[in-house]
Image (cartoon, grey):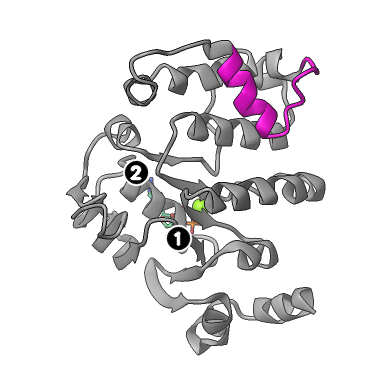
């Protein structure tokens, strides 16, 4: 039954920080295999929404269901272990470790061991394979350098590799492209698209609307912590609430699309 239902269901989720309503009564559902974009001005509650879903912040009220089971307020590692992985707007990595060792940590998780039938296998090779897929050239020395010595764009892709190593069923990307060069975005976008085509459900928070709108099925728009629109990219951009939240920005989107 659970497999037929939505992979994620968020019900009237709210978070107040002191007097700030960071997220207010946000509800939405996600089908298996769907690609959802989340947009909204700075401070509109996008990262807090991700933190609430993934257990990093405890909600003031509301609930979250993943694969039919309630996960509200569970510890982040437990939620990740169920197959819900996320990347960070501000990456959190083990900077003193070689890049590939950051990927070995999730490869050692009980979830991956279970999915591999009790065997871990060659973890170094598996880590290098995942990094290679993310554009860390296998024959270069880059995967072996301390993570802290890598340029920002590499750190974002390393964080993505770390999330993918968990073999997630749902992947949430919080501004993966911020700090990436145009060419890094151009090479990373097809990877994300391919993951979705292979069946991974993805939620992507992204400021680069042109790139986002090319890949998502549906968009959810936040403003002041509230959901102000939901629909296809063209539906939401026609919404008056979205136009006023994005004062001026919708003109850019039209210009970019042309
Ligand atoms: N840990 C926190 N403590 C206090 N206020 C916070 C905290 N995290 C976020 N906020 C506030 O919540 C609001 C939403 O922030 P955030 O979720 O980061 O927005 P976005 O990701 O859309 O830019 C902002 O007003 C922000 O200052
Ligand atoms: Mg944010």
Q: Which mark is residue 54?
A: 2
Q: Secondary structure at mark 1?
A: loop
Q: Which quadrant is home to the C terminus? A: bottom right
Residue 154: x and y in percent read 70, 32
Query: Which sits in the foreground, 54 or 113?
Result: 113
Query: Which sits in the foreground, 137 or 48?
Result: 137
The part of the chain drawn in magenta is: 125-141
Write down the residue under mark 1. Answer: 34
At 26% from the left edge and 49% from the top edge, which residue is drawn?
A: 67
Residue 231: x and y in percent read 46, 77
How many circles with numbers are drawn on the protein?
A: 2
Q: Is residue 8 above or below residue 97?
A: below
- Local packing at callout 2 (Cα closer than 10 Å; few below 14, some 14-19, many 20+) is many
Q: Quadrant of residue 151?
A: top right
Q: Look at the image and say whether residue 178 sits in the magenta stretch.
A: no
Q: Secondary structure at mark 2?
A: helix
């Amino acid at each position: 039954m659970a497999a037929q239902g939505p992979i994620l269901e968020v019900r009237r989720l709210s978070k107040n920080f002191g007097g700030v309503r960071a997220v207010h009564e946000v509800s939405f559902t996600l089908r298996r295999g769907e690609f959802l974009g989340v947009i909204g001005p700075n401070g509109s509650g996008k990262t807090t929404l991700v933190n609430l879903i993934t257990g990093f912040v405890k909600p003031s009220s509301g609930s979250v269901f993943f694969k039919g089971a309630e996960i509200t307020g569970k510890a982040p590692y437990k939620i990740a272990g169920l197959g819900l992985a996320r990347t960070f707007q501000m990456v959190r990595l083990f900077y003193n470790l070689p890049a590939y060792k950051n990927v070995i940590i999730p490869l050692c998780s009980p979830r991956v061991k279970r999915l591999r039938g009790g065997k871990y296998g060659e973890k170094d090779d598996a880590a290098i394979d995942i990094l290679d897929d993310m554009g860390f050239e296998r024959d270069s020395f880059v995967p072996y350098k301390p993570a802290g010595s890598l340029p920002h764009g590499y750190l974002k892709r390393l964080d993505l590799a770390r999330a993918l190593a968990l073999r997630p069923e749902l992947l949430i990307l919080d501004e993966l492209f911020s700090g990436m060069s145009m060419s890094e975005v151009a090479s990373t976008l097809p990877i994300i698209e391919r993951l979705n085509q292979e069946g991974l459900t993805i939620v992507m928070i992204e400021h680069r609307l042109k790139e986002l709108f090319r890949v998502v099925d549906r968009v959810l728009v936040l403003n002041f912590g509230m959901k102000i629109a939901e629909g296809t990219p063209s539906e939401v951009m026609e919404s008056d609430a979205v136009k006023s939240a994005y004062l001026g920005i919708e003109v850019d989107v039209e210009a970019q699309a042309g």
